[in-house]
Structures are given as C-alpha cells and as structure tokens.
Amino acid sequence: MADVEGGGPPKARSNGYNNPNQYYVATSESSWTSWLVPMIVVANVAVFIVTMFVNNCPKNNLGFEGKCVAKFLGRLSFQPLKENPLFGPSAATLEKMGGLQWYKVVHGNEAWRLIACIWLHAGVIHVLANMLSLVFIGIRLEQQFGFVRVGIIYLLSGLGGSILSALFLQSHNNISVGASGALFGLLGAMLSELLTNWSIYTNKAAALFTLVIIIAINLAVGILPHVDNFAHIGGFMSGFLLGFVLLFRPQFGWMESRNLPAGGRVKSKYKAYQLVLCVLALALVIVWYTVGLVMLFKGEDGNEHCSWCHYLSCVPTKHWKCNNPS
C-alpha cells in the first residue's frame, strides 16, 4: 500500500518470497509454457515507467521535501527520498494513475480503481520486489496449471485484496497500490493446491511446513507501518479458496491406470474430499465477493464491525506509530 499523502512515507504492498514447491511428484500431465507471468511482469514495469513519466518530478516537485533523485533521468527522476524512500512517484501521481482510494471508489463511481491499483507500484524497490516474487511463484504455477487458471487466480485475488483494503483503510490519505494482493493470492492457491492434491506429493509434512512458514513470515511483515496487510490478507484468502476450485488434480495413478484392464483401474478420477472442498470453496468465494462488494458500495467501514482488526495491518510499538482509526 502507498500512504503517501500529507508528506508521509509510502506504504507498499510488499512481498518477500522463497520457492517452497519442490516436493511435487511429476505425473504424465503435459507441462504448459509460461508466457502470461512474463507478460504481467513486462506490463507492471511498463506501467511504472509511464507513471514516472506522468510524475515528471523536475517540473512538479515544489522542493518542500528536497530535490528530485537521479536527475539525469529527466522527467523519469524520482521524488525526494523524504517524500518517497522507495524511489518512486508522488502520492498525487499514484492517485491520478488509479491508486486505490476508498472515497473515490465509493462516492466517485471509480470502481475501476479496485483493479487498476494492482498494476501500480510506489517505487523501484516496490516493483522489483513484487516482480521477482511473481516470477518465483507464478511461472511454476503456470507451467503446472496453464495461463487461464493462474490468470483468474491472479486477477480475482488482486480484486479480493483491494476490497478488503478499501473496507478497512478509508482515510482520505490512504492510497493503496501494488500487486502483493494478487501475489498473496498465488501463495494461498499454492497452499490449497498442496492440501487438495495431497496424494501426489512426497515429503508432505516438509512441503506444508515450508509453505506455511513462508506465508507466515510474509504476513508478519504486514504488521509494520506503511504496509497494507489488508490487501495481503484479502488476496491470500481469495487465492486460498480459488485454489480448491481451480487447481485440483486427478488422484495419483489415475492417468496411468486408464491403460490397464477395467479391474485394475482407479475407480474415480478425483477423490471425494477434492470435490467436497471444491464445492465448499466455490460457495465461500461467491459469498465473500458478494458480501464484500455490497458492504463496500454501501459505504460501510469494516472497523465498525471489527474493532481490533486494524492491528492486522499495523501493530504500534515504541519504535513506530500507526494511523489507526479512532
């Protein structure tokens, strides 16, 4: 998230990631060629360059926070580090380009910001961290499941992160940007994919432990100030449910058993629990997006329904303060 109004430093939907998916047992299913994830990376970098071009620090910086950084880049130079330490544009530019702001979504009829914000980033550090994470997470998933399913999870998780962020961060100073909601959705989908396809993994406990630790560490980063953990949580929750719906595989040995005599075949393509989880997750996905969007466009404040939830995004300590709602 980027909370860069009022001279505050940018909040970024940040994400650090190590690849845990190393315990998968290969089957006879064909592998897909990954092209969507590289295209998403290119699109995000291109949008960031356009954002910096629109920002035009040499012309628009008033000098109150210092001088533009990397002036040799011309109009692509960055805002003063005191204003944006992530080497990026101003809050006004992010807002102009489609940053998520609750008031504009609900009262300005600009619902498109719920999707546009996941293509924007608060700075070079922000976009590089997210795109490296996307490469590590997304390419492997796309190779296994194809661009359609991974693309659906990426976009819907980004939307889910934006919905939860807008429900809880409603200050006029909050401008939320970043692809981390979508990235956490892919992480959530990896977890549900592991659970629903349990039989095709070796070292199941190690795989689960590794993935849970990575998810926990990344969510823990979200309790720091200037990070939109609601986008992370909303994206993760959406991707976790969507993984049960879109990423379940035939049970182990089914593909190979089709060539065996009828008496030696695996009786069903999918296990019963896979189908049950798929139906339950689909129902929860529909309820989540319906309730979330209805609450959002009715102008409801999530903090009124959950007085402690603001601690999920920032925990105040003696070293920093949080701009929590009163």
Image (cartoon, rainbow, N blue to C red):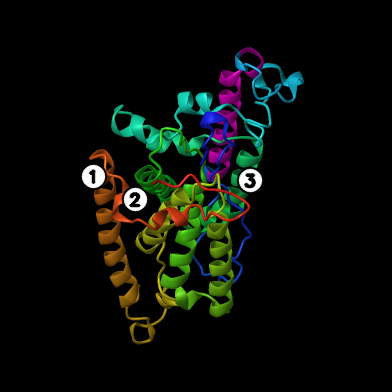
Give the residue type that dot 1 points to.
Val
Residue that mark 3 sits on: 129
Badge 3 crowding class, 10 Å Cα cut-off, few under 14, some 14 to 19, many 20 or more, is some
* Residue 247 x %, y %: 41, 61
Give the residue type that dot 3 points to.
Ala
Residue that mark 1 sits on: 294
Pick whichever of labels 1 and 3 is earlier in the sequence.
3
Query: Mark 2 against mark 1, which lies toward the viewer?
Result: 2
Q: Residue at x 70, y 23 (%)?
A: 66
**CA distance separating discs 1 and 3:** 33 Å
| Magenta residues (range) | 37-59
Badge 2 crowding class, 10 Å Cα cut-off, few under 14, some 14 to 19, many 20 or more, is some
Q: Which residue is drawn at 51% across and 41% down?
A: 1
* Residue 48 x %, y %: 58, 30
Which is more toward the observer, 147 or 54?
54
* Residue 34 x %, y %: 55, 48
Q: Which mark is residue 303?
A: 2
* Residue 170 x %, y %: 38, 39
Which is more toward the observer, 109 or 264?
109
Badge 1 crowding class, 10 Å Cα cut-off, few under 14, some 14 to 19, many 20 or more, is few
Can you see residue 135? yes
Taking 197 as reference, is 156 above or below it?
above
Give the residue type that dot 2 points to.
Asn
Pick whichever of labels 3 and 2 is earlier in the sequence.
3
Q: Is residue 294 left or right of residue 185?
A: left
Count of marks overlaid on the render: 3
